[in-house]
Image: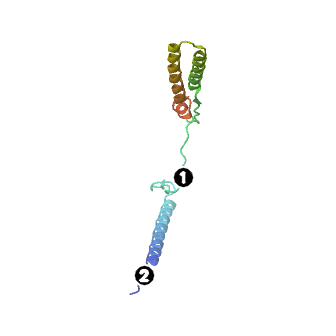
C-alpha cells in the first residue's frame, strides 16, 4: 500500500468536495429545467464570511453632526481673570495690613481656581455638545 502525504490527502479531499458540489448544482439545474414554473425550493445561498453586505440606510438616519461648545467655560475663565486683576489692583492700592492680608488670601484662592480651570482637560470635560 502506498503512503499518502497530508498535502495529497487535502488535495484529494478538496477535489472530492468540488465534485460533490458540482453534482448538487447539476441536480438543482435539472430540477429547475423539469419544473420551470415552480420556484426553487432550496434555501437562498448565504453570503460567505468575507463578503461585505452594506447596511440599508433609512431616510431618517442621515449623518448627524455634533458640535462642541466651550463658551460657558470661556466666560467662566474670563470672569476669574477679571476678578484676579481687580484683586491685584485693590491689593496695590490698599494701605491697611489686615485688609491687604484678606485680599492676598482671596487672590490666592482665585489664582488656584484659575489654574484649575484654565487648561484643556477642564475645557474638554465641560464642553457642551449639541
Q: Which of the image's four quarters has the C terminus?
A: top right
Residue nearest the observer in this picture, 126 or 92: 92
State the image coordinates of residue 36 (x, y, percent, origin top left). 51, 57
Q: Which residue is mark 1?
A: 52
C-alpha gap between disc 2 and disc 1: 38 Å
How many residues crowd around disc 1 within 10 Å: few (fewer than 14), some, or many (20 or more)?
few
Q: Quadrant of residue 68?
A: top right
Along the line of sight, which residue is nearer the eye, 76 or 111? 111
Judged from this view, the residue extending furthest toward the top is 96
Q: Tell me if 8 is positioned left or right of 56 in this view.
A: left
Picture quarter with the N terminus: bottom left
List x then y, in percent, for residue 22: 49, 68
Residue 92, relative to residue 30: is it above or below?
above
The answer to whether residue 61 is visible is: yes
Q: Secondary structure at mark 1?
A: loop
Above or below residue 15? Residue 87 is above
* x, y percent for residue 25: 49, 64
Of callouts 2 and 1, the N-terminal one: 2
* Residue closest to the eye, 14 or 95: 95
Q: Residue furthest bottom?
A: 1
Say the numbered circle drawn on residue 77. none
In this rendering, is residue 7 above or below 95? below
Q: Give the residue number, with chain letter if any, for mark 2.
A: 4
Amino acid at each position: 500500500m502506498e503512503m499518502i502525504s497530508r498535502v495529497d490527502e487535502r488535495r484529494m479531499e478538496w477535489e472530492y468536495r468540488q465534485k460533490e458540489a458540482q453534482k448538487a448544482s447539476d441536480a438543482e439545474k435539472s430540477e429547475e429545467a423539469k419544473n420551470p414554473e415552480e420556484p426553487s425550493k432550496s434555501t437562498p445561498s448565504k453570503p460567505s464570511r468575507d463578503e461585505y453586505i452594506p447596511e440599508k440606510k433609512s431616510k431618517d438616519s442621515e449623518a448627524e453632526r455634533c458640535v462642541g461648545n466651550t463658551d460657558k467655560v470661556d466666560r467662566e475663565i474670563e470672569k476669574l481673570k477679571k476678578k484676579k486683576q481687580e484683586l491685584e489692583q485693590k491689593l496695590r492700592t490698599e494701605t491697611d495690613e489686615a485688609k491687604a492680608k484678606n485680599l492676598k488670601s482671596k487672590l490666592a484662592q482665585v489664582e488656584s481656581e484659575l489654574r484649575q480651570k484654565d487648561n484643556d482637560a477642564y475645557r474638554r470635560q465641560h464642553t457642551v455638545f449639541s
